[in-house]
Amino acid sequence: MRRDGAPRGLTVDDGTVWLWNVRHRHPDCRTVLALRRAGRPHALLRLVFREAPGRAVAGFPMGRHEVLAAGGGRLNLDEPGVVRRFLDAALARGLVPVADGTREEDGWPLFDALTADGPGSRAPGS
């Protein structure tokens, strides 16, 4: 059994391996998706999803690492396909650090972009 929060690997088309994990944090109830290239342990992107009006992160009746918006859209951050979509969107927007350091970004704008087509835009298995 995999340890909770342990990094998982994701290989993209060019052969680059990305490591990612998801954790839920308190006291300010947030879910964090962390992404970094394998071999670059100190260049980290954290996409942070905080509870807000019309926004929910993990908990009943949702899955452990699901995020959702009241207006539509629900994504499960434990699904590699969903993580790949976030990675592609972050790369396209230039959010992934290329030098050592940690960059924290609000994950909700990416969520909105990925779910813009409504509930039907959910990734398989999410």
Image: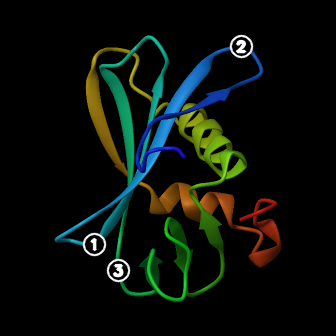
- Is 89 on the left-hand or right-hand side of 47? right
Of callouts 3 and 2, which one flags the residue occurring earlier in the amino acid sequence? 2
Residue nearest the viewer, comparing 53 with 122 = 122
Secondary structure category for the residue under label 3? loop
Question: Label 3 vs label 2: CA separation?
Answer: 37 Å
Question: Label 1 vs label 3: CA separation?
Answer: 10 Å
In this rendering, the label closer to the viewer, 1 or 3: 1
The C terminus sits in image quarter: bottom right
Q: Residue at x 51, y 44 (%)?
A: 2
**Residue at the spot of label 3:** 52
Residue nearest the viewer, comparing 59 with 6 = 6
Residue furthest front as drawn: 1
Amino acid type at mark 1: Cys
- Is 25 on the left-hand or right-hand side of 118? left
Residue 1: % across, % down: 54, 46
- Relative to 67, residue 47 above or below: above
Residue 57, by quadrant, is bottom left
Residue 72, by quadrant, is bottom right
Amino acid type at mark 3: Ala
Q: Residues within 10 Å of mark 2 (few under 14, many from 20)?
A: few
Residue 5: % across, % down: 40, 47
**Residue at the spot of label 2:** 15
Label 2 near label 1: C-beta < 8 Å?
no
Q: Residues within 10 Å of mark 1 (few under 14, many from 20)?
A: some
Q: Residue at x 58, y 55 (%)?
A: 78
- Is 12 on the left-hand or right-hand side of 94? right
Q: Residue at x 64, y 37 (%)?
A: 88
Of callouts 1 and 2, which one flags the residue occurring earlier in the amino acid sequence? 2
**Residue at the spot of label 1:** 29
In this rendering, the label closer to the viewer, 3 or 2: 2
Question: Label 1 vs label 2: CA separation?
Answer: 35 Å
